[in-house]
Image (spheres, rainbow, N blue to C red):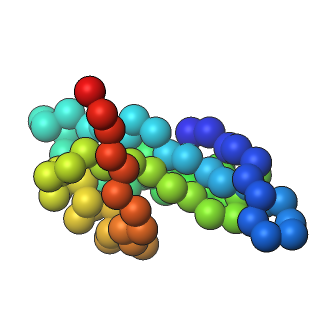
Amino acid sequence: MSVDKTSTSDEQSLLGQLESLYVGRDYRKLGLGVSLASKGIAWLKNNSVSSIQLSVGQGNEQAISFYQKLGFRERATTMQLF
């Protein structure tokens, strides 16, 4: 997790970032991912973030579905040049 200061219009706000959340195949569907993500989200909210973002690899529909169930919505597409 990380917290970054960002500027929105006239005020400064904090942006939280969930990074590298991964649960091995043998441990999926046991509630571990929800528990980890929920703890991270709670920590970020307790540290006054105004919004939380994360990145999911293109085509990772399982992860996208997981985060949508936690309330995340797609807002942007990130592109990369190799």
Q: Relative to 40, is 76 above or below?
A: below
The percent position of residue 48, horizontal first and vertical second, equals: 77, 58
Residue at far right of view: 10
Left or right of 78? Residue 8 is right
Give the residue at x 20% y 39%.
27
The percent position of residue 72, horizontal first and vertical second, equals: 42, 68
Give the residue at x 66% y 54%.
15
Residue 48 appears anywhere in the view: no
Residue 1 appears anywhere in the view: yes
Left or right of 65? Residue 39 is right
Quadrant the C terminus occupies:
top left
15 or 20: nearer the eye? Answer: 15
Left or right of 64? Residue 61 is left
Q: Relative to 44, is 67 above or below?
A: below
61 or 76: nearer the eye? Answer: 76
Q: Relative to 67, is 21 above or below?
A: above
The percent position of residue 43, horizontal first and vertical second, equals: 65, 50
Give the residue at x 32% y 70%.
69
Residue at far top of view: 82
Quadrant the N terminus occupies:
top right
69 or 81: nearer the eye? Answer: 81
3 or 7: nearer the eye? Answer: 7
The percent position of residue 50, horizontal first and vertical second, equals: 70, 64
Q: Looking at the rendering, which quadrant does residue 62 occupy?
A: bottom left
How many callouts does the rendering have?
A: 0
Give the residue at x 77% y 58%.
7
Q: Looking at the rendering, which quadrant does residue 51 occupy?
A: bottom right
